[in-house]
Image (cartoon, helix red, strand yellow):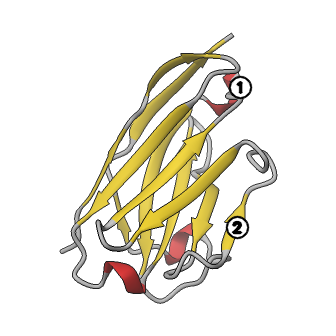
Amino acid sequence: QAQLVESGGGLVQAGGSLRLSCAASERSFSSYVKGWFRQTPGKEREVVATISWSGGSIHYADYVKGRFTISRDNAKNTVSLQMNSLKPEDTAVYYCATSVHGNIWSAKEDYDYWGQGTQVTVSS
């Protein structure tokens, strides 16, 4: 069973930056698509960014494009999310996830493993 552990969340003022990291225990980490998602109370979990196994293909949701950057280090089994120019509406629990058979356009239902999430709060 794969295990994903997120870190790096916290409280930041609007306009600030945070870097989230996700450490994964999958044996074939480098073969899988990775994604960052977020969720606020009462809302559906939504995609933030996804990255292919090689890092060569990346997808960003429109609401973070130009502000967030996803990256991965297959040698260290980690995937990161650099978040700049944060806005209060970015406040959410952020989740790291693995899709074994999907691609960067896959829906959240196609992700097989999820971390516990890390809270990001952006104050105005």
Residue located 40% across and 86% down the image = 31
User: Which residue is under mark 1?
Assistant: 87
Amino acid type shown at disc 1: Lys
Looking at the rendered structure, the secondary structure element under dot 2 is strand
- How packed mark 2 is, by other alpha carbons closer than 10 Å (few <14, some 14-19, many 20 or more), is some
Residue 79 percent location from the top left of the image: 43, 60
Quarter of the image containing the C terminus?
top right
- How packed mark 1 is, by other alpha carbons closer than 10 Å (few <14, some 14-19, many 20 or more), is some
Quadrant of residue 84 in the image?
A: top right
Residue 51 versus residue 69 in the image, above or below: below
Q: Earlier in the sequence, mark 2 or mark 1?
A: 2
Residue located 56% across and 78% down the image = 52
- Marks 2 and 1, how far apart at CA: 20 Å
Residue 91 percent location from the top left of the image: 59, 28
Amino acid type shown at disc 2: His
User: Which residue is under mark 2?
Assistant: 59
How many discs appear?
A: 2
Residue 50 percent location from the top left of the image: 59, 66
Residue 75 percent location from the top left of the image: 31, 73
Looking at the rendered structure, the secondary structure element under dot 1 is loop
Residue located 68% across and 76% down the image = 105
Residue in front for this viewpoint, 8 or 62: 8
Residue located 51% across and 77% down the image = 110
Q: Is residue 47 left or right of residue 77?
A: right
Q: Is residue 11 left or right of residue 15?
A: left
